[in-house]
Image (tube, coloured by chain):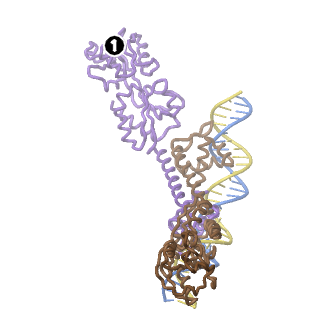
Chain colours: A brown, B purple, C blue, D yellow
Amino acid sequence: MDLRRLRYFVAVAEERSVGKAAERLRMAQPPLSVQIRKLEAELGAPLFRRGTRGMDLTEAGLALLSRASEALALAEEGIEAARAIASGQRGRLAVGYMFVLASAVLPRLVPELRRSLPGVDLDFVELSASTRETLLLDRAVSVALCMPAIHHPEIQVAQIGTQPLMLAMPARSPLARLSAVPVSRLQGRPLIALPRPEEPTSSAVSAMLRRHQVVMPVVSRVETVHSALSLVLAGEGLAILPACAKLGAPPGIAFRRFVDIADTIEIAACWRRDSASPLIRSFLKGAEKVVAHL
Amino acid sequence: MDLRRLRYFVAVAEERSVGKAAERLRMAQPPLSVQIRKLEAELGAPLFRRGTRGMDLTEAGLALLSRASEALALAEEGIEAARAIASGQRGRLAVGYMFVLASAVLPRLVPELRRSLPGVDLDFVELSASTRETLLLDRAVSVALCMPAIHHPEIQVAQIGTQPLMLAMPARSPLARLSAVPVSRLQGRPLIALPRPEEPTSSAVSAMLRRHQVVMPVVSRVETVHSALSLVLAGEGLAILPACAKLGAPPGIAFRRFVDIADTIEIAACWRRDSASPLIRSFLKGAEKVVAHL
DNA sequence: CATAGGCATACCGAAAACGTATGGGTTGGC
DNA sequence: GCCAACCCATACGTTTTCGGTATGCCTATG
């Protein structure tokens, strides 16, 4: 069974004439006639009644026609769908993000992606430091917004932006009068920490403090940036967060940079090398645009 | 787009291996590999990720797979359906019948056909003398039970049985004492005629009467054999009908043959020459069986 | 009776597919 | 750490099949 034969058959059936169909198919009439007869031979039954004024479908031909044209349409749709997915016009993109980025990036990234990738099913998945690699490698996540990047031979990384670490404190705090805070001033002050020390942001913070030989007792570990800021506002302690966290911060919170350090933490997009696709590229464009305006 | 390529693709996708698929397709591995790559080239996008342990579908490949296997199934179903119809296992048979045969033949023919042609859609259509030829030629009717046969170059005829003409009268009529009635005894008696002189049964009757130079005034023209017999029972007149009409006749009606004529009227099956099919043959078998037992 | 329209057949050149032989890369065992 | 096994890709020669041109046959039409 050859799809071409079916295509020929459908053309002849619709035109009710070998000659007309040959014209439509941009081919000569005799080979088309031969193909139709071959199809009939393969079937063991005539599909057409040959009259002096063209061809007319038999019952068997009628039965074949409906299925054949459906099959043709399906095949066509299949290759179109595959092309559309390959070209990034359609498909599915599972975007992973680390929770520190959620409040700052997602509200602008989601609409941006929905606008620039119509026809693409978007999923957004929160990642933790312990699962992000596995999810990427298993393709449960197509691309991940990480902070900082993942390093793995199978995973490709594009830096999208950097974020300085900043100090979040109540606006009424004396430290808030400074435009930049010396790290040493943090010594002994209570720290509202992000969850689980393995979290990259958390570990970047503790590495920075250790480097400056500053000790801050951890008074609370919270799950979200929003919770952290609420506790800061309540006077429970200070938080050290990427600058982007100041978006979505409630009024009454002051963010200040540090005077003596230029510690930044990178925002990176990570994806499987073999999953590289136009979809990923479109995602990068959108993500860069959003991150640039943080 | 070639259906073979799709078939190959589906095999590889299902086996997740070129080698395994080649085995299943009874072909060597290299040409299959080539065909897959050609399909990918035609699409402009990879359908598989080549790993060291076989092939793995990409998103585009997944999208193609579902449609392609559906299309394959449809094509297969199409040729199977066409074959089934051509072989008479399935299809549609529109059986035409002339109304004089309805009461005698249909009650036994219909169940017989339904039994011997399962899977075939049966339609039963009453024919009139004026439309039967047209309906056959237009294929609105696949085969017609006629009385007598149709003569036309495009139409093929098979005689299924013959029916003697008989006289129908009230059982209490003096004529009913005879086991056979001389035609001359009909002279001047009132005749309950079947509708429209062009009806074959009607015209066979009038030809017979003319041949014997017997005149019977027509007192009533009725549409159905049943009506005719009711009028006979009511004493309105006599009817001359094919013997098969006595089946389904109400009690109180006597049927008698004639002494001096052997006029029979043939029951024939008629169909378009170019519609000859196993279905028609099966029909003939069933119809002969039923008519033989009239 | 001649012409035109439509499908079928015959033959030839071109393209595509299949098989065999072989190469390259990775995995896993000795 | 090397060698064998596995799997896919490439190359080349052979065969099948397809499409084009030329032509024949049949029927309807004027």
The quadrant of the picture occupied by the N terminus of chain B is bottom right
Residue annotated with mark 1: B237
Dot 1: element: loop
Q: Position of residue B214 (x, y in %)?
A: 39, 10
| Left-right relation of A146 to A20 | left
Up the image or down, A173 lies above or below B223; here it is below
Query: D14 and A286: which one is in front?
Result: A286
Q: Judge the density around disc 1: few (<14), some (14-19), many (≥20) Cα neighbours within 10 Å.
A: many
Up the image or down, A117 lies above or below A228; here it is above
Location of residue A240 by image quarter: bottom right
Q: Position of residue A186 (x, y in %)?
A: 55, 85
> In this figure, what is the number of numbered marks?
1
Q: Label 1 sits on what residue type?
A: Gly
Q: Chain of mark 1?
A: B
Up the image or down, B105 lies above or below B173; here it is below
Q: Is residue A134 visible?
A: no
The quadrant of the picture occupied by the C terminus of chain B is top left
| Left-right relation of A102 to B115 | right
| Left-right relation of B265 to A37 | left
Q: Position of residue A130 (x, y in %)?
A: 49, 78
